[in-house]
Image (cartoon, helix red, strand yellow):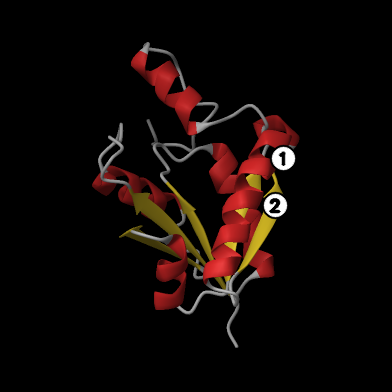
Amino acid sequence: MERIAVFPGSFDPVTRGHESIIRRALPLFDRVIVAIGENGEKKSFFPLEKRIAWLHDLFAGEAGIEIASYSGLTVDFCQKYNARFILRGLRTAADFEFERGIGQMNKMMVPGIETVFLLCEPEYAALSSSIVRDIIRNGGDVRQFVPPGVG
């Protein structure tokens, strides 16, 4: 059976931390689906189309990576794509506590789906899309925090 992982997130914008987690997950799974979650109650900074384009450009030529968008429950998206794993990156203990709760709820809803955590690389521990958006809003240079062409 193919090992398919879904890496859900807003990717608003995609950061070098996201890129690192995705690339490091490739040897662990047959396919990684980068799934941009759409939340109707939350206004995105960058349009969905731009985020999809950035991810397509970033992972062009990577056969094991797919880009998709979805709304609703992540476990429902996983079932649609026969994914048995949800991939999450952890920067801090607070991330772990938050993600653990979501992972446990997902497991209760769909017992066949496992949440897999990868620790971020130390240089990305302070990096978040929220901080990058704030830097952009205030005219700062984000090139060291995002892949080329993003921002």
Q: Is residue 41 above or below residue 27?
A: above
Which quadrant of the rendered structure holds the N terminus? bottom right
Distance from disc 1 to disc 2, alpha carbons, whole Å, reads: 9 Å
Residue at position x 46%, y 56% in the image: 59
Residue at position x 32%, y 46% in the image: 39
Residue to which mark 1 is pinned: 121
Give the mark toward the camera: 1 or 2: 2
Q: Position of residue 25 (x, y in %)?
A: 64, 60
Instruction: Evaluate if marks 1 and 2 touch, with contact meaning CB atoms under 8 Å apart.
Output: no
> Which of the two residues, 140 or 73, is positioned nearer the viewer here?
73
User: Badge 1, how many Cα within 10 Å: few under 14, some, many 20+?
Assistant: few
Q: Position of residue 78 (x, y in %)?
A: 46, 70
Amino acid type at circle 2 is Leu
Q: Is residue 35 visible?
A: yes
As drawn, the label of residue 137 is none
Which quadrant of the rendered structure holds the C terminus? top left
Which residue in the rendered view is the most extreme toward the bottom? 1
> Which of the two residues, 2 or 104, is positioned nearer the viewer here?
104
Q: Position of residue 69 (x, y in %)?
A: 33, 58
Q: Is residue 13 above or below residue 48?
A: above
Q: Is residue 121 above or below residue 125?
A: below
As drawn, the label of residue 118 is 2
Residue at position x 41%, y 37% in the image: 13
Amino acid type at circle 1 is Glu
User: Badge 2, how many Cα within 10 Å: few under 14, some, many 20+?
Assistant: some
Q: Hey, which quadrant is residue 125 in on the image?
A: top right
Q: Is residue 92 visible?
A: no
At mark 1, the secondary structure is loop
